[in-house]
Amino acid sequence: MSDGEKSPGSVPAKVSFFIEIFTASMAAILLEIAYTRIFSFKVFYYFTYLIIGLGLLGIGTGGVAVAISGRIRRIDPAKLVPALSSIGALSIFAGYFLIGPTQINATLLTKDFNEVLKLIFVSLVLMVPFLSVGLIISTILGSARADLVGKLYGTDLIGAALGCVLVIPLLQWLDPPGTVMLSGFIMAAGGLRLGRRSKPILAAAAVATVLLGAFVVTAKQLPDPVVDRNKSLEDYKANGLHRFSKWNPVFRVDVVDHPFFPGEVFLLMHDGQPGSGLRRFDGSFKRFDYLATDSRSMPFQVVPKEPRVLIIGAAGGHEVVASLFFGASHVTGVELNPVTYSLLTDVYADLSGRLAENPKVTLLNGDGRWFLKQTDQKWDLIWFVAPDSYAAMNASTSGAFVLSESYLYTVEMLREGLKHLTDEGAICTQFGELDYHGKPNRTTRYLATAREAYRDLGIPNFEKHVSVGGAAGFPPYAESVVILGRSELTPERLRPLHVQTKRVKGGTTHYSPDRPPNNSPVNQVITMPEGELASWFGSHKYLVDPVRDNSPFFWHFVRYRDALGSTMNLGGGIVDFEDTIGEKITLIFLGVAVLLAGVFLLLPFFMIRKIWSEMPHKGNALVYFSALGLGFMFLEVAFIQKLTLFLGYPTYSLSVTLFAILVFSGLGSLLSGRFASKRNKALLVLFGVLVTLVAIYQFALPGIIDAFVGSSLALRVGLTVLLLAPVSFCLGSFMPMGLTAVSSLSKHSREYVAWAWAVNGFFSVIASILSTILGMVIGFRLLLLLSLVVYAVGVMALLRIPSSAKAAEA
């Protein structure tokens, strides 16, 4: 506390803040996760980490403001807290109506400064409610009696953890916009009890509660967020072609009429962009005669007659019908999104010919990896029909997948698929290529990944197991059809394929074992001697090396050092959004994070620069708290990414991981006081435990995921919590040990703690973006190891700080 500053008014003994801190924390976590879904729809999935960073920024800023502002601390907490609850709730309400209609065009962020300004505006609006939460929590903890601080902190964690538990069903029942309103309702309601002490505050709390409650009840009527203009949903809405929409924690699904075949063909939009197709089917194949010359016919030429087919990404059932058209004896379709699944089983069941009731068809709702791990069945054809996009050719039109992980295109997934093929079976995957002859990046990388999978399984002569064909796609894309045989594709098996390829519109053969290869990247990655591949990958203009679960960014083709160059255009002004755009966007995110974190977390200390100059051991404290900010987020993001595969989708992984980390790091924080008398020894022991745990995760976690990924979701969630409990407990002890250390070094203990908190927050916000970039560059295994290096540097810095003020003076 600075000289001459009045002490804050004491809080009456009867006043407790358990309800207020509980509701504020629950509201914050619901708001954060709901907006990760909204921004996945509004822009793209990789905005998730920006949302996390903004949440950290807002809460951290609130803590800093309370610590350095005597004016805030002099306000009666019993009046300030309910007032902040009302302000936060109303900012949530207003924020949705400001953020929703503001169109952010992600691909223009690299060349239009107005888009950057819109991103900053939206970020600031989104930060306001988190700022209110930070002010509430800091005010409550700062004014509480010493014997209540631990209980209040525990209540804070319970509120946030309960929010993590409830958010998935709430996203399903209320939709993400409704969940945003519910978070505001909870925060407003939290201010009613103490609001009775002041009529104006009570009136504000009551108005906010009623207003937000009304919007929760009518959540389904809330206006949709406006999506990125590169997503085509807005165009279909404007032309009156929109028919159906439903949110889901996986992705939102909209059904629109095909503009050229209304009533006959429907497009399923996944998070606002084309994801799959649904065609009218009455049991007769007359409407599907076009399939005879369609690229979908190609894989059926190399598999046994009347094949058993598995479709990963059944979506609107188009490929299910195609399989029946080509004589499949049975078709199993696996679809991740329950909404998409329900279209075939309920909403559009009649229109789609009740495929789910066809005796030759089995439709399942689940993840493709999960399904393969829990069955011992084998199929003649496993068909990956662009399972995370209807036409993979659509993926690059938005740049959406560049920064998104996909565990369906990894070495491990292909290994699993090959194990479930019959001897004469094949895997087929189709891609759209914008410039196949210039940079067939998708096809090349998939084949490099497949070659690695064959090598892992000990299957020799990869070049004899592969066929790559081409066909006319949706302009300006050309279609690439990759066929991988479990056994060698002999000339006899390939002969029908060559005949059929000539019948397909735009059909061509890019590679076939019975024809001489050329020097294209596709042919080189198939036929090049094993010893030359690594060098070729390193010198190739694009990243087309094999993709593994450790860094499953299949669509990340451009090195970050190359992303600083200009966007590459093709002839005719066509922009390839997979070429540098996604990478540039992450760098813009990083810049925005640094700017906002610096302004709101560090710049305020300029106001108390005289006090700051008197704080001892700032250098070591800076290193320690910045290391905690970086290291903690590196670990958190690495776990979220690694557990996405295990739990099935990012939203599940985010909520479960945050739940486990909140609960057990909170327990670690609460018990850390027992180590205070032997700080240095405890610090070294904790770091040793952390190293041991991360080493165990490095070696054991992949095996655990592999062994249990086919288990029920409930079991996987429980196992995730158990896995994260010990490391979270350990991580939770480092921060309070450091805060205790610096608080004893100076008479300005409150300001020192606030500065330490701000430094930690600054680097946490940066790390929320930086960890994604590093995961793409070095992989998540090395990111975990890097977190240990960062923690080691921090521990060494804290060991140099005296353990008491007396030692400091000495």
Image (spheres, rainbow, N blue to C red):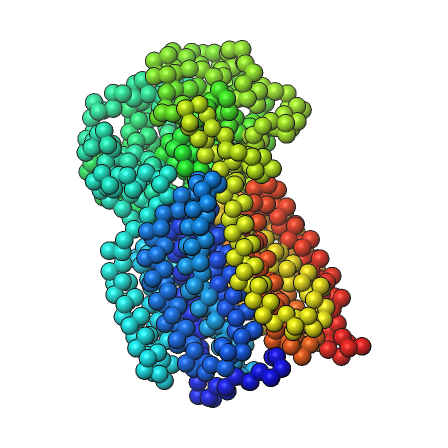
Count of labels shown?
0
Q: Quarter-wise, where is residue 480 in the image?
A: top left
The one of 668 and 545 positioned closer to us in this rendering: 545
The one of 793 and 594 positioned closer to us in this rendering: 594
Q: Position of residue 110 (x, y in %)?
A: 48, 41
Instruction: State which quarter of the image contains the C terminus.
Output: bottom right
Residue placed furthest toward the right: 810
Residue placed furthest toward the bottom: 13
Res 479 visible: no
Establish if 141 lies above or below 130: below
Q: Position of residue 526 (x, y in %)?
A: 56, 21
Q: Quarter-wise, where is residue 265 in the image?
A: top left
Identified at 44% across, 23% down, the residue is 571
Instruction: State which quarter of the image contains the N terminus.
Output: bottom right
Q: Position of residue 723 (x, y in %)?
A: 55, 56
Q: Position of residue 186 (x, y in %)?
A: 36, 69
Establish if 77 lies above or below 505: below
Res 279 visible: yes
Establish if 325 lies above or below 136: above
Q: Quarter-wise, where is residue 537 in the image?
A: top right
Identified at 46% across, 73% down, the residue is 136
The one of 766 and 708 positioned closer to us in this rendering: 766
Left or right, 527 with reference to 214:
right
Identified at 60% across, 67% down, the residue is 606
Left or right, 307 with reference to 579:
left
Identified at 43% across, 78% down, the residue is 80
